[in-house]
Image (cartoon, rainbow, N blue to C red):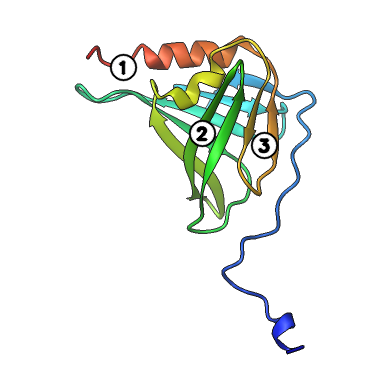
């Protein structure tokens, strides 16, 4: 029995990560990629990004969200966006980026999960085990959402 307690399950999730300090973090337009905004402390790695993926033909535009926190391979979760009187839940998966796994997901630009971005107040983004990111107020996410949604074809 004592031996069984020392065996580590390979299927267990990694230990949870602390929430990052977002004092001084800002939204900015990506200088590396078009239709993308970045959230983080200037001069440090991004904490979160939003990218607008225009649809082709009659397909709607999508928004891709990436939370730059370690993710276990093949893991999936719901990322919660909370703020501006709305709660959104978006499916994210562990996605390989270079030598690491990060959380990434996408949904149509008109999905109600993006509603917390549509307002002037602070937003929080949470992925289980990846901590809570406080997204400081900025008009940029609101403008980004409006612009991306304008690419949705009229139905």
Q: Which mark is residue 152?
A: 1
Please report contact status of discs 3 and 2: CB closer than 8 Å, yes or no: no
Question: Which of the two discs, 3 and 1, sits closer to the camera?
Answer: 1
Q: Earlier in the sequence, mark 3 or mark 1?
A: 3
Say what secondary structure mark 1 lies in: loop
Say what secondary structure mark 2 lies in: strand
The residue where tag 2 is placed is 89
> How many circles with numbers are drawn on the protein?
3
Q: Where residue 38 sits in the image (x, y, percent)?
A: 59, 26
Question: Which of the two discs, 2 and 1, sits closer to the camera?
Answer: 2
Quadrant in the rendering for residue 106: top left
**Residue 33 makes an appearance in the image:** no
**Figure check: 133 above or below 83:** below
Residue at point 62%, 50% (across, down): 70
The N terminus: image quadrant: bottom right
Q: Residues within 10 Å of mark 2 (few under 14, many from 20)?
A: some
Q: Nearer the viewer, residue 7 or 53?
A: 7
Q: Where residue 33 sits in the image (x, y, percent)?
A: 48, 27
Say left or right for 143 vs 135. left
Q: Where residue 110 sits in the image (x, y, percent)?
A: 38, 20
Q: Earlier in the sequence, mark 3 or mark 2?
A: 3
Q: CA distance from mark 3 to mark 2?
A: 24 Å
Residue at point 49%, 23% (across, down): 114
Residue at point 41%, 17% (across, down): 148
The residue where tag 3 is placed is 45
């Amino acid at each position: 029995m004592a031996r069984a307690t020392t065996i580590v399950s390979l299927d267990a999730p990694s230990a949870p990560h602390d929430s990052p300090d977002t004092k001084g973090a800002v939204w900015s337009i990506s200088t590396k990629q078009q239709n993308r905004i970045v959230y983080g402390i200037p001069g440090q790695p991004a904490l979160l990004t939003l990218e607008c993926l225009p649809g082709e033909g009659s397909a709607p535009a999508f928004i891709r969200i990436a939370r730059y926190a370690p993710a276990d391979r093949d893991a999936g979760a719901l990322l919660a966006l909370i703020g501006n009187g709305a709660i959104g839940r978006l499916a994210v998966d562990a996605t390989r980026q270079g030598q690491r796994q990060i959380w990434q997901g996408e949904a149509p630009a008109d999905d109600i999960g993006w509603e917390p971005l549509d307002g002037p107040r602070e937003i929080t983004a949470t992925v289980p085990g990846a901590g809570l990111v406080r997204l400081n107020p900025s008009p940029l996410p609101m403008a980004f959402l409006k612009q991306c949604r304008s690419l949705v074809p009229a139905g």
